[in-house]
Amino acid sequence: MTAGLRAEALELRYGETVALREVSLAVGRAEVVALIGANGAGKSSLLNALMGLVPLVGGRISFDGQRLEAVPTRVRIAAGLALSPEGRRVFPDLTVEDNLDLGDLGRDLVARRRRRNEVYARFSRLAERRLQAAGTLSGGEQQMLAIGRALMAAPRLLLLDEPTLGLAPLVVQEIARFVRSVREQGVGVVLAEQNAELALAVADRAVVLQNGEVVMSGPAAELARSPEVRSAYLGL
Amino acid sequence: MKPLLRDTLAGLVLVALLASVLRSAYWLDVTTYAAVLAVYVLGVSVTFGQLGFVSFGHAAFLGLGAYTAGILCVKLGWNYWLLLPLAVLPGLLLGGLLGVVSARLSGAYFAIATLVVAEILVLLATNWVDLTRGPMGLMVTVPPLPLAKALGWNAQQGYLAVVGLALVLAFVLLRNLRDSATGRSWAAIREAPALAESLGIGTARARVFNIAVSGGVAALAGALLVPKVFVLSPALFGVANSATGILGVIVGGKATLAGPMLGGALFALLPEALRFLGELNFAAFALLLLVVVRVLPGGLVGWLGQRPGLQRWQARRTAAAEADPVVPQPLAARAHRAGQALQLLGVSRHFKGLKAVDDVSFAVAGGEIVGLIGPNGAGKTTLLNMLSGFLPTTRGQVLAFGQDIAGLAPHAVARRGVVRSFQQTAVCAPQTVAMNMRIAAHLHRRADLVGSLLRLPGWQRREQQRLAHALGCLHEVGLGERLQHQAGSLPYGEQKLLGVAMALAAEPAVLLLDEPAAGLNHAEAARLAQVLRGLRDKGLTLVVVDHNLKMLMSLVDRVVVLHHGVKIADGTPQAVTALPAVVQAYLGQPAEAAA
């Protein structure tokens, strides 16, 4: 039995278009792995495939030794995966609290309250607005809510799809601190980010995707020094 | 014009053949009834399928058409066959009225409003005995079609021919309407109403017109029903007929016009086909409907469309249409309009005591690129909403080229040259990129109802120009390759770019962009900045909200900083980023950012 996530030779197609080709990814316990790539490179597709939101054509996924590629999303969540989707998909007409509760698939109300309080402790802005409709929150607050909702499932591996999208620089720094603190608690993170600078700064390892294929991978610090990455994704 | 004549003629030949070949009274009766229901369900699908509003009361129009025809025949002695086309009018009127009255309703509330209208008509028809003979029913004897005898047809054959003619005309005209600017505006309202407004589409008017058309067609179906039912009773307005309309659309396939026709016809044919089951007939029919709805979410036509043979045929048709491709018309450079493009004078917006935007004043000169930055929740989007007409101001004035635009509806603001893009992706997700762009080019050429219905040459020329303009705008943001992709399947960043291209297609003088670079990486953001600079050189004035400071600061002439709804800075990028207040509220410590 191996700890953490192992995904091997993932294949994904949308009709005729190949979205992922032979993509493999390993994330150890409490490891942060950044996914870097242009628009349409397959970052979101990979995260959605790991969660079982899109059907794979081929490949294997296992998490802490449990095979996951053939089971539905809720089983993967129970196994310890959780996704904060791209573009802050919150339920706009529900309150902040209801949005959070939807992230918890368990039936233990005491545990639910405890986790909710943990989320509030982490994102104090959400606590202030707990009875407000999620649609009235600012963009940054909605992003926190989407992440908080993923945390409600008490994941051991957190998949973050573009968590800094549309956030002010100050809040971006907050997200970076958040990723580091989550890791300290023993939770792994897969971070798909357009902000490659930030992603490489907080990640242990990074994977570069291009047209649905892994073209580079390695320690984040090493990739941050690679000339290809610097010119293509860091704009340096 | 040519395809219009071709399709109408083909339809007429088919109808004439059918009327001549069918001899059995039973089959004539069933076929005619199927055709009447096809017209009716087509009418329902205009509102339900194309506008996306469920109506529980379309029997109101059906009954109204039937009673109008019946009363004119019986009380005034008019010739039934001659008054048939007039039966459209009461439906148009009632539909328009319903559209105006229900302008603020959507979803279930709209459905209930339609139900109420139908119930009112039931009461009216039941109690206005002098006019309708109430529950006893109005007996209408229809003379045989005069022309029928000349062609050697009996009365039933003549009736079938007329109903068939009506069906062909309704189908061809509704198809032309669907493929025109009007029909595209309905699709936009269905998929993304706010987007439609922002592109200059007057959604309120488009909606009223849609319901009027739908009512008109349904009323025509009602009038066509008269010879079949012979006695008109208030039950015509009843829920059973309304349900037939909705179910026919769902079973046939909402997204098409062929679907509703097929669905309507099935409602006449299937109960006949299931007759051998005796008393279980209707139960079996209901079960069949359930199965279709459950197994075929796209309806029968949606299912047929996925068959390989039909898909190949579709592909050949698309290929044929593209054999004569439209050359994209590059965006023409225009001179900057002189003077201030935008002036904000003491603009405020309060939400129940919360001052989202408080007393903000600044001006944007023609040809300027102004960045609007601030922490999340500072009021940037609220401000853009006020500039584009989506939110009224609590206080203050917004002038565009000297004209006050505060209080105008978004589409009116767009028509005055101020167009915005959205922070969350806003595209018509199920449609192709090409269709999105055609929708967006709504304002490029005037909509022409008669021209589009008859496919006149002038309309076709304008449609080509519209498409060329739309494609030019798409190329401007570098999405030319994505033309045939489904908009909702594009990666997030490209959906945002598509949003920019769509705003561009509405021919703005001032473009308000809400986080256009969100979801783009550095290289893509740099390309976007280049595109935006190019737009300025072509005569546009831009206000850009974004958090990608590297991109923004390289682009803008001036930056306005909002914090807690208040303007805390206004100046060149260098000057503003050096201000301690801005660093503290927004930027954070540079050392921290690098960590």
Image (tube, coloured by chain):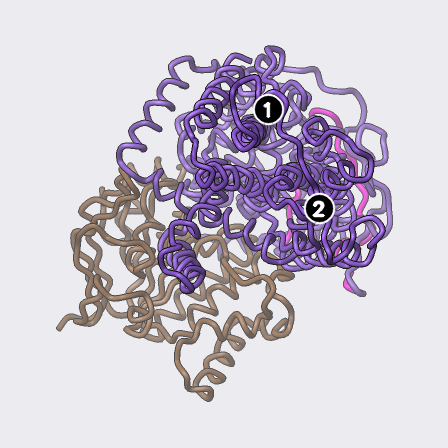
User: Furthest residue to the left?
Assistant: A1
Q: Mark 2 Cα within 10 Å, few/some/many (few <14, many 20+)?
A: some
User: Furthest residue to the bottom?
Assistant: A110
Residue at (42, 50) in percent of width and height = B272
Q: Report the chain holding disc 2.
A: B
Q: Which residue has dot 1 on it? A: B535
* Quadrant that contains the C terminus of chain B: bottom left
Q: Determine whether, in the image, residue B317 is placed left or right of residue B7.
A: left
Query: Residue B349's quadrant in the figure?
Result: bottom right
Q: Which residue has dot 2 on it? A: B139
Q: Secondary structure at mark 1?
A: helix
Camera sees residue B126: yes
Q: Mark 1 Cα within 10 Å, few/some/many (few <14, many 20+)?
A: many
The secondary structure making up most of the magenta span is strand
Q: Which chain is purple?
A: B
Q: Which chain is brown?
A: A
Magenta residues, start to end: B354-375
Judge if badges 2 and 1 mark residues of a common chain: yes
**Which amino acid, mark 1?**
Leu
Near-viewer residue (B33 or A111) = B33
